[in-house]
Image (spheres, grey):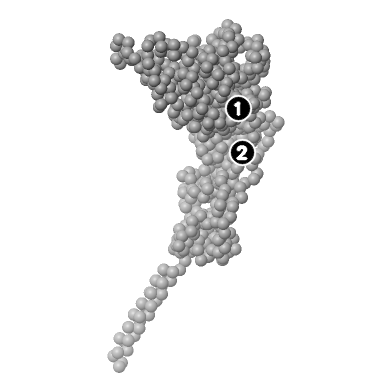
Amino acid sequence: MKKAIPVITAILLIVVIGAVTLVSMLVEKYSYSKERVDLAAYYGLAADEADSRVAVYLQDERLDMLAPLREGKCYFPIDMVHQYFNDTFYANRAEGVLLYALPSEVVRIALGGSVEERDGGSEDLGYVIAYEEGGQIYIAADYVQRYCNMELQYAQHHVQVYTRWGAATVATVTKDTAARVKGGIKSEILWDVPGGSQVKVLEQMETWSKVRTGDGYIGYVENKLLQDFTEIQETPVTGYVEPVYSSVRLPGKVSMGWHSIGGVGGNDTLESMVAGTRGMNVIAPTWFSLSDNEGNFQSFASASYVDRAHAMGLQVWGVLDDFNYNNVNQAGINDFQILSSTAVRGRLIENIVGEAMNLKLDGINIDFEKVTAECSEHYAQFIRELSIACRGNGLILSFDNYVPFSFNDYYRRDVQGKVADYVIIMGYDEHWHGSGDPGSVASIGYVSGGIDRTLEQVPAEKVINALPFYSILWTIDGATVTDEYLLLSNTKDYLQRVGAEAVWDEETSQLYAEWQSGSKTHKIWAETEESIQVKLNVMQNRGIAGVAVWQISYGTPAAWELINAYVNAP
């Protein structure tokens, strides 16, 4: 028996050790980790960035960026501000200013300064509003919040931003616990969550839920510690009021005709031009053309013309373009150079509005066709600032635009639709003079698609579609393609004279003719009263603001009768 005691002791020792090991393993397996995550590292901050940068969460999703932190204020790069919050902020790095256009004034901030300047005075906000660093403009998130319906919540090493609110699920935490980095008891602790607090449930899984705490941390909490799950409607921020951009409207539909004037003598043709029209209520003489890069323009304007047009019951919208003077004089006109300078842009606006007021014009029509993608932000600021001047002086402001496609979005029809009175689609030049590509000038698909895409950015009550009173006759001789214009007023006579048989083309909703002349092939997709009617039907169906024509002298009595019927249709 004595010999058995050591054996028994050894066995018992093994059992005890095994039991202790088993218990330890069980404790290790089922005990909750008390290890806390390094918050700075968790939010992607290097050791030397912990006090100078923060991570950014937008709508509970972390953005791939770190924002600068200065004296307790977070700063967003202006590109991010434009993308997510408000694209009205305009910075000029060369001039060191940040501008913000409101309906009646432009707010001005010197980069690196804390003062907001307005027409009625200035206000020191007590923090740097915006600054430049490394070629990038940064704007204080708190300042962005002044001009955006945005909820901003600072937390340790990160900031939470909300711009949208909707239905959400909330729950109450039953006792003190921890929000963890991942759903699991071994995951590191992210933040402590007191019992009785309410959390927003972002995602509910089998045993854990992803939640956002009231103090702005997103982590995981066990479902068994959550109760009273409730569907709520989140409350939007109410401190911000969206500015109202008032607009001037003509009673009923707009019917505008461009009057092409290449010199002062062209003003004498007003009566003869208008005599052949029906239903027109706006005439737009092409009077003004940029003449240098300092904000000046050539003018063929006549006060007598305005008085005579008014006597006929017509409004006069003077046209300012960026190409006519340059085409004749090769003056090196550069939209970017003009519009990217706050001083020059302001001088141009002052000059054109001053001229319009002196002439007693009813409106200004901007026909800038040389804007580039590089100039987009400056053109947008020009649109905003000109709208302020026109609004303040009771002038109707309209802008001419190419048929919209993704490649010309930089014309900023979205900004036009917000601040201008009318947005005009030049619904033609699908195939254009000199392109060497025979085809229709304005097929029905091209026109209707242009209207529909414009309506995605501009309210229908502001959209005017312009019709071409012309066609292009294409001549193909081997590899050589030439073209010439035919007017609506003479197209049918021309086809009859050359003996061409025109047939209706359903795809374009135009008359199509093709014929041979020796080695040459002639093609035309003809704009006629029939095709004009189809376009007007589409416009009536879309409920847009009206019609314009290029140009009034190219039409026929029958075409003008169609326009008159469209304008007066309910």
Vertical arrangement, residue 466 with respect to residue 90, above or below: above
Tell me the CA gap for discs 2 and 1: 23 Å
Residue depicted at x 68% and y 29%: 119
Q: Quadrant of residue 214?
A: bottom right
Task: Please give the label number shown on residue 147.
Answer: 2
Vertical arrangement, residue 9 with respect to residue 92, above or below: below
For label 2, the SS is loop
For label 1, the SS is loop
Label 2 or label 1, whichever comes before in sequence order: 2
User: Which sits in the foreground, 152 or 363?
Assistant: 363
Q: Residue furthest right?
A: 120
Vertical arrangement, residue 459 with respect to residue 390, above or below: below
Mark 1 nearby-residue class (10 Å; few <14, some 14–19, many ≥20): many
Q: Residue furthest bottom?
A: 1
User: Which sits in the foreground, 457 or 351?
Assistant: 457
Vertical arrangement, residue 307 with respect to residue 147, above or below: above
Task: Please give the label number shown on residue 7.
Answer: none
Quadrant of the frame with the C terminus: top right
Foreground mark, 2 or 1, reads: 1
Q: Position of residue 395 (x, y in %)?
A: 64, 23
Mark 2 nearby-residue class (10 Å; few <14, some 14–19, many ≥20): some
Label 1 sits on what residue type? Asp
Label 2 sits on what residue type? Tyr
Quadrant of the frame with the N terminus: bottom left
Residue depicted at x 29% and y 11%: 519
Residue marked by disc 1: 421
Q: Position of residue 446 (x, y in %)?
A: 44, 27
**Residue 525 appears left or right of 334:** left
Camera sees residue 513: yes
User: Which sits in the foreground, 54 or 398?
Assistant: 398
Residue depicted at x 59% and y 19%: 279
